[in-house]
Amino acid sequence: MYEFTFHQPETLDEAAQIFAHADDGQFIAGGQTIVPVMKQRLAMPSDIIDLGRISDLEGISLDGDLLTIGAMTTHAEVAASQDVKKAIPALAHLADEIGDPAVRNRGTIGGSIANNDPAADYPAALLGLGATIHTVTRAIPTDDFFTGMFETALDEGEVIVRVSIPVPEKAAYVKFPQPASRFALVGVFVAKTADGVRVAVTGAGPCVFRVKEMEQALDKDFSAAVLKGISVPDDGLNSDLHASADYRASLVSTLARRAVAQAQ
Amino acid sequence: MSVISLTVNGNPVTVDVEARSLLSRVLRDQLSLTGTHVGCDTSQCGACVVHVDGKPVKSCTMLAVQAAGTDVTTIEGLARDGKLHPMQEAFRENHGLQCGFCTPGMIMSAVALAEHNPDLDEAAVRKGLEGNLCRCTGYQNIVHAVLDGAKAMRG
């Protein structure tokens, strides 16, 4: 790992000031991606700014039909939260399937979505649930947030504070994990929300995406049967030693049907 | 370099660390606690698992400076008065190890798993150990050991 200067601010203002004065500042949340990346010398930040001591980024609350999760909430905390289990059991289940227990004790929801790994689980949930990402300066709907491979709508130095998620009527997440990394080879999140059905797919393409054709069919009839015959084109899907684009496209259809069948 | 204070296996420790030093490195090289093993160094194998404030984490994927003020337990902190921890004893009794390299991380994960899940069954043990790789045993005896150790911990 290259040398860097470490900072541990206690407020968001302090974090912003440190970032503004750094040559090449990098925020660290749970560190489960950035630490391995730095160990491989794929990143060389001058300053690492730890968000772990900022209390504004913590906490889970359920207020009527709106679930709010602080950015520094770990996957283990989301998985164990009674509020999350009650309001959106599919989200608690998803969090409990990320990586392994040790990773879930460090990794955070804010870190995961800011990183936007094309095979991460949370982007599928937040896009599928129509969540809103609240940053220090604005609220960003998830439809505008995930913009490309490891790319988001976040500006330079813009920190995620929390996410707010409207509680759906029913939802489910089904993933086919890559057995070594446990990242999603493909994962499909289906939610029946007040604004219609949403289907979000991770792992298959360079960035999480929605499948409108499935959503329209499910709006008319929320059943696994209605998805028979609907598939996503394999053009532009990921193809690697683990799975071809064609196979990933096939998994999208299969997992979407399973998710609809499991939705609760 | 920055000076950090933390508790390691019940003892207060103050140590001068580089910002880029990993917790695993500080434990092994600066505090001479070499029971914590570094296997893959890429967050996958789990040999380096220690408890930070009671929760298992991969010490190769945490900066030591982030552990300032925390309570860290390593494999060396489990035995009491020369007597093995029940989970360590269960690994010995059940032949839950062959080469032993993964064992410190296995045991640290297993202890936390047993502490947080009073009704462990085989499926829960296998899921709970997903982040710990063993290349010798095929896991069968490890699973037996964790179930036995969990029972012994409940007393």
Image (cartoon, coloured by chain):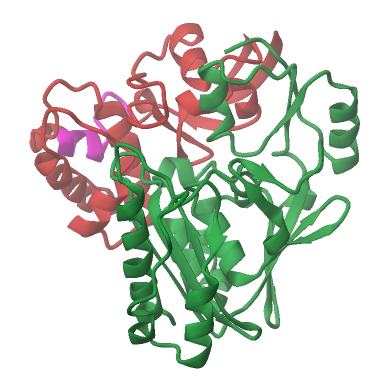
Quadrant in the rendering for residue A12: top right
- Residue A160 % position (x, y): 75, 49
- Residue A201 % position (x, y): 48, 61
Chain letter, red in picture: B
Quadrant in the rendering for residue A175: bottom left
Task: Say if B135 sits above or below A97 in the image.
Answer: above
- Residue A38 % position (x, y): 57, 21
Q: Does residue B91 show up?
A: yes
Specify the segment rendered in magenta: B80-91
Q: Does residue B83 show up?
A: no
Chain letter, green in picture: A
- Residue A78 % position (x, y): 55, 60
Q: Residue at x 9, y 36 (%)?
A: B93
Q: Give A20 or B130, whichever is nearer the viewer.
A: A20
Task: Say if B112 sits above or below A215 in the image.
Answer: above
Q: Residue at x 35, y 27 (%)?
A: B75
Q: Is residue A47 left or right of residue A18?
A: left
